Image: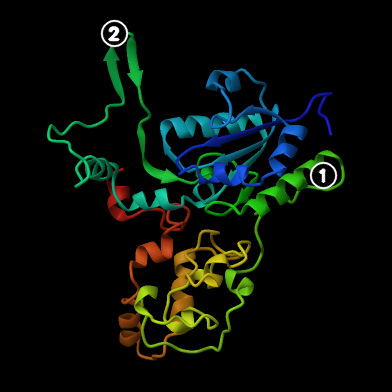
Amino acid sequence: MTVNGNKPKFAMYWAASCGGCEIAVLNTHETILDVDANFEVVFWPIAMDAKYKDVEAMEDGSILLTLFNGGIRNDENEHLAKLMRRKSKILVAFGSCASEGCIPGLANFSPVSEIVQTAFNTITTDNPNQIYPRTSYDVPEGELHIPTLSPLLRPLDQVVDVDYYMPGCPPESHQIAAVIDLVIKVLKGEAQLPPKGAVIGAGNSTVCDECPRTRNVKLIKEFKRIQDIAPVDPTLCLLEQGIPCNGLATRSGCNARCPQAGAQCIGCYGPAEGVIDYGSRLITAFSSVIDANEPEEIERILDRIPDPAGQMYRFNLAGSLMKASKSAWENK
């Protein structure tokens, strides 16, 4: 279980994300002690004091396992992605943001200038003098620098080579614990890692296959917001009640927590196995339950889906075939 007489090194980094992935790791409870027992934690900014220069001084490939959560939104994120790739034997795109862009990736619908303008000129932002962040600023102590926003947010694998993907927003704690247990068994020679590029900590099917709700192949005439349906049948498939549920295209692994609680799947575990473009798969799935034959009528019903862009690409825009809107591409 040792490497050259020492415990193997572990690292975790938080890029453009909310921090929920870090909390999910802590929510593995006693398993977090196994990490400490079996690994030397050398870089985990949220949990320990460490500097970039400490990582830069390490030998390339000296870190056995790095869990990298968050997308690449600025030059600091990109620098750390390349640094951790160079220093790590195994680099995992950990969570939806690193795997496919997630909620921050929705900013790819707008150019950077519009994003900054909105952020500093909304109803909750008092900015009468129109002051905006600057990437550098001179102070008596020297020149200060803040990260420069990149034209588009990118998932980790659009910047560096990734060994494994672990989806979820955040990944389920029991799935994280299972992956940690697997790595420890590999260190002990009791198991083998999956092939490079594999999705770990998730299933190979869809959320629908985990969902206990009954499906009757019932066709619908319209889509509705869940709050507009009263009461919601607690046993019938939500999609067959006209509620746009993404379970048909979403990877399994969450135990269908949302549908079981009466809320539609919104896709946080990412595209199911074999799904090339999540939004295209969803449109096909939704169209299949529409009770209409004429293209115009089908289009009219699909137009009733609330927030179609968010419905189709809430977690996946940056990792989709589209990646960004035309305006963001043209103004990047």
Residue 320 % position (x, y)? 46, 57
Q: Is residue 256 left or right of residue 111?
A: right
Q: CA distance from mark 1 to mark 2?
A: 54 Å
For the view shown, which residue lies furthest in the left direction?
Answer: 128
Query: Circle 1 is placed at which residue position?
Result: 185
The residue drawn where x is 72% and y is 43% is: 31
Q: Identify which amino acid the numbered label 1 is placed on.
A: Lys
Q: Residues within 10 Å of mark 2 (few under 14, many from 20)?
A: few
Residue 216 % position (x, y)? 55, 89
Residue 246 % position (x, y)? 49, 70
Badge 2 marks a residue whose secondary structure is loop
Q: Is residue 157 above or below residue 220?
A: above
Q: Is residue 110 left or right of residue 221?
A: left
Quarter of the picture holding the N terminus: top right
Given residues 152 and 330, the one toward you in this image is 152
Labels 1 and 2: the sequence-earlier one: 2
Quarter of the picture holding the C terminus: top left
For the view shown, which residue lies furthest in the top direction?
Answer: 140
Evaluate whether residue 309 shows in this view: yes
Q: Is residue 53 above or below residue 81?
A: above
The residue drawn where x is 37% and y is 53% is: 106
Badge 1 marks a residue whose secondary structure is helix
Residue 227 % position (x, y)? 36, 74
Given residues 162 and 217, the one toward you in this image is 217
Q: Quadrant of residue 203?
A: bottom right
Residue 140: numbered disc: 2
Q: Is residue 292 above or below residue 224?
A: below
